[in-house]
Structures are given as C-alpha cells and as structure tokens.
Image: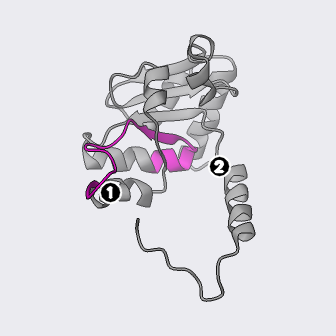
C-alpha cells in the first residue's frame, strides 16, 4: 500500500465518508463507458481520458498484466497515472467486459439509466439496451454519430457531447 499521510489531529471517518458521498452525488451515473486497455498508446489513452473527464464517462479496464499482487502494484499505479491526471474516472471491472461482450478496445457504450453494474447481474435484459461503437476513434466522434439518432440515448449523447465542447 502507498504511504498515506494522516493529519496529526487524526482521521475523521465521518468527514471522509461525507466527502465521498458528495463526490458520488456529483459523479455521473456511469451510463457512458469507455472500455480501454493499457496496451493502447499513451497518447490515445490520455486523449480519451480528457474527453471522459469532460463528458462524465468512466474508463473501464479489464485488469493489469500480472495483477495487482506483489511488486506489480507500483507498476500498475504508474501505468494509470497519466489517465488519472487527465481527470478520468477509472474502474478495473472485468465483469463489465464480460457483461457487454467487449472484445476490442476502445469500445464505447452508452446505456439507459438503470444499467451499468445492473448489466452484470442481468446480462440478457440490461446489456442489450445500449448504443455501442468499437474502434480507434475519439469520444467526441462517437457521440456525434450517436447524436444523429433520436430518442433518449441520442439526447444523452448530445448532452455529453456539449460537455466535451465546453457548453453547459
């Protein structure tokens, strides 16, 4: 584990929990997922991470080579550092890869409001009601294509695209 500096006044667990709860309220609802791999170029990952941060998307990774055990922890943290510094939310969630049948990276998924982790527990119903794009493209490109449609998911794509473009 990394060294964690504890204030001399001690740790207020209630304050930490409150801050976490506020952050979760401000975070997106994990409807926009970018499935990626650390095998992608760092430039592509950082570009996607910046767009993910602006749009409220979550970058999902299957895992890291060698796992997180032993001496691999520091190497793994270092690999994710540029993505985290770009402001992206990151999850290591191999079950989401299975649930959405992701076999290529990047894969972009926009779901209806009740999906995300619900897709893991109810694959047959939840995972199929989503927009999906696969390929080495940017998030704004994908959102532009999805925005051309109609319905709730197209509206959500337009909202996320506007956030990338700096509109409220």
Q: Are marks 2 and 1 in contact (CB under 8 Å)?
A: no
Q: Is residue 154 magenta?
A: no
- Judged from the image, the secondary structure of the residue bearing numbered disc 1 is helix
Residue 27 is labelled as 2
Q: Position of residue 44 (x, y in %)?
A: 31, 44
Residue 70 image offset from top left, x and y in percent = 28, 56
Q: Nearer the viewer, mark 2 or mark 1?
A: 1
**Crowd band around label 1 with a 10 angstrom C-alpha radius: few (<14), some (14–19), many (20+):** some
Residue 16 in the figure: left or right of residue 157: right
Point out residue 166 in the picture as x, y percentages from the top left corner.
58, 50
> Which residues lie in the magenta part?
50-72
- The structure residue drawn at horizontal position 69% and vertical position 28%, both measured from the top left corner, is 113
Label for residue 123?
A: none
x, y (%) of residue 17? 71, 62
Q: Is residue 68 magenta?
A: yes
**Dot 2: what SS?**
loop
- Among the 4 quarters of the image, the one containing residue 56: top right
Give the left or right position of residue 71, taking residue 24 as reference.
left
């Amino acid at each position: 584990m990394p060294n964690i500096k504890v204030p001399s006044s001690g740790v207020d667990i209630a304050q930490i929990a409150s801050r976490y709860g506020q952050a979760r309220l401000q975070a997106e609802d994990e409807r926009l997922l970018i499935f990626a791999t650390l095998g992608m170029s760092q430039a592509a990952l950082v570009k996607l991470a910046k767009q993910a941060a602006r749009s409220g998307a979550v970058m999902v990774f299957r895992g890291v080579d060698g796992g997180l055990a032993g001496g691999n922890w520091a190497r793994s943290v270092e690999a994710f550092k540029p993505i985290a510094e770009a402001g992206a939310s990151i999850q290591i969630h191999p079950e989401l890869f299975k649930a959405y049948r992701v076999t290529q990276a990047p894969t972009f998924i926009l779901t209806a409001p009740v999906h995300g982790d619900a897709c893991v527990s109810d694959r047959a119903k939840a995972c199929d009601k989503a927009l999906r794009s696969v390929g080495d493209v940017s998030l704004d490109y994908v959102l532009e294509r999805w925005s051309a449609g109609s319905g709730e998911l197209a509206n959500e794509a337009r909202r996320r695209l506007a956030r990338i473009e700096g509109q409220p």
